[in-house]
Amino acid sequence: MTDPIITLSDIVGESLPPGIAALPAASQCDLAELVTAAVATQTQSLSAAATSALDQLPPLLRWPLLRLLSAQ
Amino acid sequence: MTVPASNPQLTKLARTLGVSEQRIAYLAEVPPADLNRFRGQVADRIYAEHAAGIARITLAARIIPPSIAVRLILRNGSPLLTARLAAATEHGRAVEIARRLPADFLADVAAHLDATQAGRLVSALPPSTVCAVVARLAAAADWVTLGTLVPALPPPLLRAVVGELDGVAILRCAAMTDSPEHAAALAAALDATAVDRARGAAERHLLWDEWSLLGLPR
């Protein structure tokens, strides 16, 4: 079984504040899932909005912009 | 398990995680300073996930003239994407675009910026626009965003926007500030009539805990 303290602190990338580190393992696992879900939700929202923005660009700007994006 | 009505750090963490306060009610006993630090860690984690992609888009989007960018932003209608791009865009260009956006949309964008980003961007806008943004946030009872944004404004602008807030809004805003220093900055911007409004609201709505954060005599 994965150590829940390491899992949550790994996810946030830093050592946890004492009050969070002292939570029961089940609570830390739950928080880890919530953080992961929040990241995924924002990824989905940003991806959908960016795709939609590209579709709405006038063709004269869309292709140069796509070229710039693919060149990076 | 019920969530205490006055647990601003829990409210803010719930907003960052995109869940209800009830969903994380088991954190109610965690010290507020620890909740605040953890919220910052979560926000940084979410932000870092997309930082590279946002930077690439920002770089490429420089070929889009501001006037067209404004039309695209409004048609696209994503305050989240707009906020992330604004935070990564060169300041002058971000301000040029933001100046052309309606206050309602800017208020929605502000909800996705952190205090530093929001303060820097919003304080470069005309005071009338900033006041309209603040009024919109107050009307929507978005105290989390107000508590983050308002104290980050420079003092002259802060004094102007406080004039837009009724007593309850001043107190709710104080409760959602990120630090005692921010609450003190808010208190310092209150003129005598604003203090009276806040005190009156504390009396009517029993918001003395929020009032105490301002450090003003009762």
Image (tube, grey):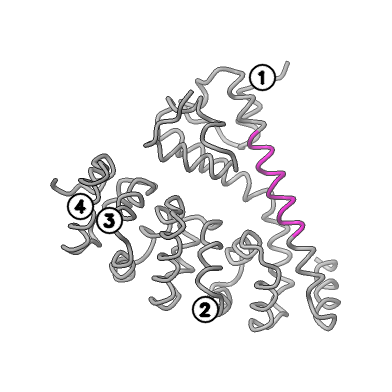
**In front of the other: B136 or B119:** B136
Give the farthest residue toward the left: B217
Marks 2/1: CA distance?
49 Å
Residue A35 belongs to the span the image colors magenta = yes
Q: Quadrant of residue A45?
A: bottom right
Q: Disc 3 sits on a residue from what chain? A: B
Q: Disc 4 sits on a residue from what chain? A: B
Name the residue: 65% across, 32% down. Answer: A10
Q: Residue beneath label 1, please?
A: A3
Nearer mark to the viewer, of 3 and 1: 3
Q: Residue beneath label 3, please?
A: B167
Please say if the residues under marks 4 and 3 sit with CB atoms less than 8 Å apart. yes
Marks 4/2: CA distance?
35 Å
Residue neighbourhood size for the residue with mark 3, other residues' Cα within 10 Å, grouped as few (<14), some (14–19), many (≥20) = many
Name the residue: 54% across, 41% down. Answer: B41
Question: What kind of residue is marked 3?
Answer: Gly
**In front of the other: A12 or B174:** B174
Q: Could you tell whether B181 is left or right of B126 in the image?
A: left
- Circle 3: element type: helix
- On the image, the x and y values in percent for residue B210 come to 28, 44
Q: Residue beneath label 4, please?
A: B200
Name the residue: 23% across, 47% down. Answer: B204
Q: Disc 1 sits on a residue from what chain? A: A
Nearer mark to the viewer, of 4 and 2: 4
Marks 4/1: CA distance?
51 Å
Q: Could you tell whether B97 is left or right of A66 in the image?
A: left
Question: What kind of residue is marked 1?
Answer: Asp
Residue A56 belongs to the span the image colors magenta = no
Q: Quadrant of residue B166?
A: bottom left
